[in-house]
Image (spheres, coloured by chain):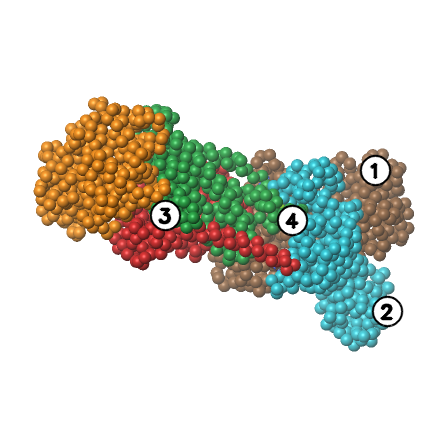
Chain colours: A green, B orange, C red, D brown, E cyan
Amino acid sequence: MKNKKFVRIVLIPVFIHMIVFIIMPIVAGLGMSFLDYNPLRSINEFIGFSNFERLLADDNFKIALVNTLVFVIVTVCINIILSLVLAQLINMFKSNKTRSLFRMIFFLPCVAPLVASSVVWGKSIFPTVNGLANMILNALGLSSVNWIGDPSMVMISIIIFTIWADIGYNVILFTAGLDGIPKDYYEAAELDGANGFQKFRYITVPLLGRTFAFVTLMTLISHFQMFAQFSVMILRNGPANSGLVLTSYIYKTAFETKDMGYASAISMVLFIIILGITMVQQKANKVDWEY
Amino acid sequence: QGSSDENSDKTVLTFWGHQNEAWNKAYEEMAAKFEAENEDIEIKFEFFPYDQFESKVQTSLLSQEGGADIYELWGGWGIDFAPTGALAPINDTLTKEILDGYYEPTYGSLMFEEKLYGFPLEFNIEYGGMIINDNILEEKSISVPQNWEELRTAAKNATVKDGDTFVTKGFDFVNWDSVTYMFTSMIMSQGGSYQNEDGTFTFNTEEGRKAFQELTDMVVKDGVTDLSGLTGGEGLEGYQQLFAGTTAMVPRGPWTISEGELSFELKYGEDFDYVSLPFYGETKSFAAETGWSLAVNGNSKKSDAAMRFLEFFAQEENLLEFNVACAQIPASKEVAQDPEFIKKMPYAEPLVKILDDGHFVGYFNTDTFKEKINEVFTEYATGGYASVDDALMDLDKKLNSAINK
Amino acid sequence: MKLKIKREQVVRFSIFLLLALIAVFFILPYIWMILNSFKSTKEILMSPKNIFPEHFTLDAYIKVLTNSPFFTWFKNSAFITITNTLVILFVSAIVGYVFSKYEFRFKKTLFMIVLATMMVPAQTTMIPSFLLIDKLGLYNTAGALIFPTFVNAFGIYLCKQFCDEIPAEIIESAKLDGAGDITIFFRIVLPMIKPAIGALAIFTFLTYWNDYLNPLIMLSEVKNMTLPLALSFFAQQHTADLAAQMAASALIMIPVTIVFMTFQKYFIKGIAMTGMK
Amino acid sequence: MANIELKNINKFYDKNVHAVTDFNLEIRDKEFIVFVGPSGCGKSTTLRMIAGLEEISSGELYIDGVLENDRPSKDRDIAMVFQSYALYPHMSVYDNMAFGLKLKKTPKDEIDRRIKDAAQILEITDYLKRKPKQLSGGQRQRVALGRAIVRNAKVFLMDEPLSNLDAKLRVQMRSEIIQLHQKIKATTIYVTHDQTEAMTMATRLVIMKDGFIQQIGTPKEVYDHPKNQFVAGFIGSPAMNFIEGVIEDGCFKFSDCSFKLPEITHKRLTDYHGKKVTMGIRPEDIYTEKIVEQTYPEVNFDFKIEVSELLGHETIIHGCIDCHKLIAKVNARNNVKAGDVIEVTFDADKLHFFDQETGQSVLHETK
Amino acid sequence: MANIELKNINKFYDKNVHAVTDFNLEIRDKEFIVFVGPSGCGKSTTLRMIAGLEEISSGELYIDGVLENDRPSKDRDIAMVFQSYALYPHMSVYDNMAFGLKLKKTPKDEIDRRIKDAAQILEITDYLKRKPKQLSGGQRQRVALGRAIVRNAKVFLMDEPLSNLDAKLRVQMRSEIIQLHQKIKATTIYVTHDQTEAMTMATRLVIMKDGFIQQIGTPKEVYDHPKNQFVAGFIGSPAMNFIEGVIEDGCFKFSDCSFKLPEITHKRLTDYHGKKVTMGIRPEDIYTEKIVEQTYPEVNFDFKIEVSELLGHETIIHGCIDCHKLIAKVNARNNVKAGDVIEVTFDADKLHFFDQETGQSVLHETK
Ligand SMILES: Nc1ncnc2c1ncn2[C@@H]1O[C@H](COP(=O)(O)OP(=O)(O)OP(=O)(O)O)[C@@H](O)[C@H]1O
Ligand SMILES: Nc1ncnc2c1ncn2[C@@H]1O[C@H](COP(=O)(O)OP(=O)(O)OP(=O)(O)O)[C@@H](O)[C@H]1O
Ligand SMILES: [Mg+2]
Ligand SMILES: [Mg+2]
């Protein structure tokens, strides 16, 4: 009603905070991308769109861009499909104990700091000679794989790791989503003559829409921003830059090459990509029903 | 550490360095000695993990308040920091002393507009020495190679393969630093050069092609090692593999010795040795870059006291003691040639011999430099270029656009 | 009848086996990490094929705990994480409530702005944020990791979703009972969105406990550092003390794992409604 | 404890939706007013304006002579029972009832006393420690009432408080609310769209449609003398039957049928001679008994039964008289079934007539 | 299209809850059977066993003579309407109805034809393209029916399909379902706990309590001759009044009152002379009219009115005769109000008597 005072008391500090800590830095970042910026210098030259022009000619940027897109799209797809299947399998158990046991196991990797798991995987699982992965392969009579040394394998390895590390959230979200679908629909479908797969295809998948939209959105956003495994697990940018992604390229450009203006330009591109993809995803996943 | 009594009018200097047990101890000992002489100064140390150190230094320099008074600075960073005014210039007397009495590669990158912005502690030598696994060489009855031909033969002989995978690598020079420094040094030892007067690069020369082909051949034709040192994938670095008994020879700095002794519990002189790496061409000449140095924060209000600490370091007996404690190759000619030094670090002998032949690699960001050379090397070795010509032409292009933007 | 039950059991059992197999894949890295943390670095390096430690040793743990200010870092991490979690919970709840239950101009736009901040990659704001923190004199203080986090878009979104579920009548009832805005928030809304608060608590706790990039940039002194940075503490320039790294990893993971296992029921209950509606 | 006056009250939503138009009503102390009307007619809106939960767009609201338009709801001293009960789910029954009193800083023992009293009246003493979730629908309903009672508020508002209950419970709660009102005698406004509730509970009824008041009066007035066709059709279940026809020669003619009107009725309809009107008759005024037939020999018709629903002692029959669909409620003793054709009689004294254009009751107006 | 036979069917949940006990019932083709009973009595469970959604713990279920116990529900050819409708929210009305047919690979134009037909019957043709969310409760209800109709299933099951609708709509849908059944004539089982629905819709009623069948019969049978006190109290609204007393000297005595029983009644009660019994009388069998009083002069009592509810043409009065609470439903013409004491008469021919221990009807048994 007329009680706008409370709204103001709550929202004004919040938006001031947002302006200071989020919006200003974005604007500053945008500004920096037009400068030949080095914060140690007191005067930084305005160079217009040069940084962005440089992007167009930068092979490494292109590689990083392609790698990022490949990484995000493949990982997110596998992540979603796999977590959906796992959730469905978990939900087939009636016992709550069994369910929460499995949910917990799948969530464990999410509990650990990504850096820590990256160290564990990079130093003791993926190495060709000393790694657990190859030891297991060898024990099964398969030959070793050069997980993070072979340019064609690097991304695959990182994807495997990322899925391991991140799938737990989605498994839990999907099991919860599945629990939320009223049982009636399955019974109605059963009487309509649907078999197990048909129920999954025609009832579960579409009715999970809302969860699905939410999960894909969050997963997309977080995967675009992943950094730790790329910086910790692989040597430099990986063989032939096969592990170079935008986030690590930004970090490298800013803190190793110390070319902050250029780094800002790249991060602006990343921002726009994320914004664009999430908007498309939101449109595509519009859900026009509810139970 | 001495108690930092707030009430006393002691000047407290903060010192940042990267973590290394031996080094950190040596710094603290130096500081204790210094404090004994200068009772008005106290030095507080902060040591950071190596892989955080660079960004720490950088961000702290951005900050007006935070940061240290004295930094342990990788010489190469001077190129980025010195021009911005973030570092304080070294005083004139010390500058003169350095310019006269220190090896040129150690301070080349600390120079900016005729001023020095750091005090070089060590000569970072990436060419000239290698570690060898005595047990492997003995088993194969291979003697320590004395010239390039012998090196190539020894490498081939030492190599053992099981199908596609290595049992023993003969000569593993493929790592982030060695490829670049072998390549540049091979050019120089043939009497060639790779950088022009104006700072641009030309690797595509007679000498360059020969050297590049030679290096690639060792991987592709001779198969004495593979590219994993650059591409990653193996848990251990090349020299660690040598300690682990799967590699015979690895060109690396003498700092590797302590790790062999400590982590792998091997005996120097028995299990492994440090020997000269033969030159490729006729001329004894190689490229070298900086090493660790000490620098003073440009914003520090205590830069005078800080500078005194640097001067203290510069005294020969202190430097000698420090270099030995850290197993560093001295930056100071005087210290390096001091017989006392070789007595204390006998394994440094093959290096000390050739220090005069070292030349400053050039005033540019060596990380990018190495990155591009390694990139092209990997690509060429895996058949990514039609000819060595193409590869080096591309390398020139890449370097010229990346470094001279 | 008997047959049917049997078939169902077989199906269920094979699903169990399948899940168990995948579960093994999920916990194997942990086990491997723990096993390695009980070896010496030499053993990890020289005898990689040893599954169980040849010489069981606690050296790595002792090293981590004595050679580094591990407990100080633990305290720092705990302080920052707990402060952040509490503040974020409060701010998210009250802002979520306002967005859900009050009408005001530009509400949709403002909410969209809040949501959009979720999509800003950390890298975009990393450098300017750093400069800002420094200007504010927060560099190298816990404040650098605390102040910028107060407004958490995800938290606000989550709390709004939950507040949407609170019937308007309950709020109106409270008004007629004589409650003002603050009273309604604390006495009615907050208790009613407990599950959201629970889920959000674990989310934020994990986020800040595990945060690596921000402490890396914002903190300079060793005594101010947080646990995730501890890992690189044992990675020296060339030598990596693998055993110590594994031990440190294990030590960092153990507290969160315990927290999670204890609260997982609430967490799952809360998360169950996350963004579902 | 309070009289309420609503003067020319209007409510617009978003400038376009005119939810309530020129609402005028004076409620006397201790009255039990029921607002009734179809969905969306503005009942809740009016109630919520009185409670202060919705702004009044124009007009004035007085409680005990004081203008209340701008007073926030928390200061109006009004208690309200919602359709969904709106019990605080995280508080025990006791705390639910105590909440408002605590906020008013009522002494602890006073709170306790009032709650115990109310609990006794409502027979929920045993559940005081339970959470709302652990109660059945009827019990929750009682707690909601209790929460309102303890406040000793001047005015009691109830917005469809029974519509979430099942039929049986609804009947029971209905009489409990009536008894409660007789006990505590608070001025009460009760909103429903269920006309049974409206009829049984109200001292006065306010019948609304599309934001307009249609009629105000006691249930009997409204039932016996609906002011217009809407009210006539709305009140009574099954609804009144309507047949369109013409008044001619003292008769009402529809299709091929026609019957003579009683004298008084006919007299009142003089203005409509030769004109089209809508006749209305309640299902319970249609009889199958021979005895009634004899009383009104003129108004007998053949009734073709389509559906017959037995309701214990009476039967509702759906069917038609000469293509006009009608519903009749007749004694169950007569065994009738679908397909039968029976003779029925209209109680000619109970007929209603409405203007076809305005829908206004013709008899009523001239009365 | 099918007859269903349930033989000794039992259902245990978790070994402890005996939800349905020894259920025996034969349903003939085209019957409209209604299961009725209080909440938790096992109605849904029984229905779900027939549908195959719940396993049968013991006993046999035959449809058209074929044992169905182990057949999965998708093969049973049964259509069901759920209380929640369970319309697939992501499909249009058309697709909702088409889903089952598509799964059976019915040709496209056949599907189309059937849906159009059903939509016409149910008057939902205009909504075929909408999503369930865009429909009102009644429309959703019709779609749910439509989805069941198009399947042409042998058996139709409905589990409280009307309980989510408001009272008015419920009445309307009730008669629509009756008409629908008359049209399509599918064997139907309908579950409700609303006795009005039960009475008006069933060809036969099955009254359950605690998993046991209490009585099976047509609505009239059950209403007029309840087999036991539970059925008597459950069927009829307001519920039958019960008074405990003793049969002595051809009279029924309770408290200080007593009245003479009609001859036939008394004769049937010979076994109970001098014993305690419970007498039952329906509210509508209590009269205030003088004319009835004269018919049964012996059974006149003073009735003290506590609450009186006007329901249009009749009034429900709550009150007591000598401390025995009773409800009566009387003609509205008599203006009665709370506090009055009036004279009422029991229709002595409509009395019921129940054994106080077993609750069985005494008259019924001896009939
Ligand atoms: N917040 C709102 N914004 C816009 N229109 C509204 C709003 N609330 C109600 N209306 C409209 O105002 C009119 C009256 O609504 P109100 O809720 O008072 O009806 P009601 O009589 O209580 O109906 P019901 O019996 O369904 O509760 C309706 O047409 C409704 O659509
Ligand atoms: N899945 C179940 N597990 C255990 N007990 C159950 C289950 N489903 C139902 N019951 C129990 O079985 C009994 C019969 O339940 P059922 O659902 O058939 O009742 P109902 O007659 O349909 O009641 P309502 O009118 O409330 O729908 C109840 O006591 C109920 O608690
Ligand atoms: Mg309403
Ligand atoms: Mg049920």
Q: Are marks 4 and 2 on the same chain?
A: no
Residue hosting label 3: A131
Q: Dot 4 falls on which chain?
A: A
Kind of residue sitting beneath label 2: Ile
Q: Chain of mark 2?
A: E
Nearest to viewer (mark 1 / mark 3): 3
Rounded to the nearest whole Å, what is the CA distance between mark 4 and mark 3? 49 Å
- Residue E295: in sight, yes or no? yes
- Label 1: few (<14), some (14–19) or many (≥20) C-alpha neighbours in 10 Å: many
Does the residue at mark 4 contact the one at mark 2 (Cβ under 8 Å)? no
Determine which residue is flagged by label 2: E264
Q: Identify which residue, A4 or C231, lies in the foreground.
A: C231
Structural distance between the alpha carbons of marks 4 and 2: 56 Å
Residue behind mark 1: D245
Q: Position of residue E174 (x, y in %)?
A: 74, 49
What's the CA distance linking mark 1 and mark 3?
A: 96 Å
- The answer to whether residue A224 is left or right of residue D15 is left
- Disc 3 versus disc 2: distance between alpha carbons? 99 Å
> What is the chain letter for disc 1?
D
The amino acid on which the numbered mark 4 sits, given as a three-letter code, is: Glu
